[in-house]
Amino acid sequence: MKIAVLISGSGSNLQALIDTAASGSLDADIAVVLSNKAEAYGLERAADAGIATAIVDHRDFEQRKDFDRALLAALQPYAVDLVILAGFMRILTPTFIGAYRGRLLNIHPSLLPKYPGLNTHQRAIDAGDSWSGATVHFVTEELDGGPPIIHARVPVEDGDTPERLAARVLEKEHLIYPLAAQWFAEGRLTLGNSGAELDGKLLPVGGASLEDYS
């Protein structure tokens, strides 16, 4: 399986994918890493691993759909089977999402469907939640609203700050993202009419739990 990874920043989830692919735990080839920011550190991670890189700067386009068309053009030569958004800080339009429907994954730092959007850790703390976490989901036109695939929970501790909570959640992200990608590579994970399916069975509303697969 050939993967494209889209990033905007440091690329820690990208590194987790690179490492699991190198170890053989992810049976896939990361064909290209694409960023909308030339200064993204994740591009260096990709170069160090011998992975092709590409840059499509969103600031060069007046309309989102034109940016998305440029993304599609940049990915076309690589003929990838799966596109993974790993800290890609742009809202994609139906132009892009439709082209990769069922083959487009994102990770979000909350237990979806709770807290789509930004400031997830502060919102969990403010709400007095006992648990937070991260969720891998299929991407649809609804922001952070695509069917969840797998989540991992972390406890919200007394006196937590958003930064401390985010660091613990990120550790879990590095576990569940490669696992979801491997399920896809094995042909076990699909986007069905009613939601995400694993081994032909509809997954729960919040996705599978890492606790059941570790």
Image (cartoon, helix red, strand yellow):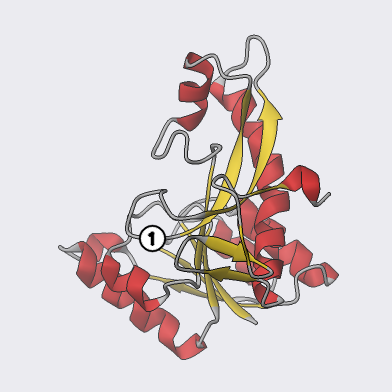
Write the residue at 65% across / 40% down. 170
**Residue 55, quarter of picture:** bottom left
Q: Secondary structure at mark 1?
A: loop
Relative placement, left or right, of 91 versus 149 is left
In terms of depth relative to the viewer, which is nearer, 162 or 102? 102
Q: Position of residue 168 (x, y in %)?
A: 69, 32
**Residue 46, quarter of picture:** bottom right
Quadrant (top left, top right, bottom left, bottom right) of the N terminus: bottom right
Write the residue at 58% across / 75% down. 3
Write the residue at 57% across / 71% down. 190
Relative placement, left or right, of 46 versus 58 is right
Number of labelled discs?
A: 1
Q: Kindly tell me whether residue 48 is visible in this rendering.
A: no
In the image, residue 138 above or below residue 128? below
Q: Position of residue 143 (x, y in %)?
A: 35, 50
Mark 1 crowdedness (10 Å alpha carbons): few <14, some 14-19, many ≥20: many
Relative placement, left or right, of 190 versus 17 is left
Q: Position of residue 151 (x, y in %)?
A: 64, 45
Q: Position of residue 211 (x, y in %)?
A: 78, 43
Residue annotated with mark 1: 140
The amino acid on which the numbered mark 1 sits, given as a three-letter code, is Thr
Residue at the limit of the structure toward the left, as seen here: 62
In terms of depth relative to the viewer, which is nearer, 6 or 117? 117
In the image, residue 44 above or below residue 99? above
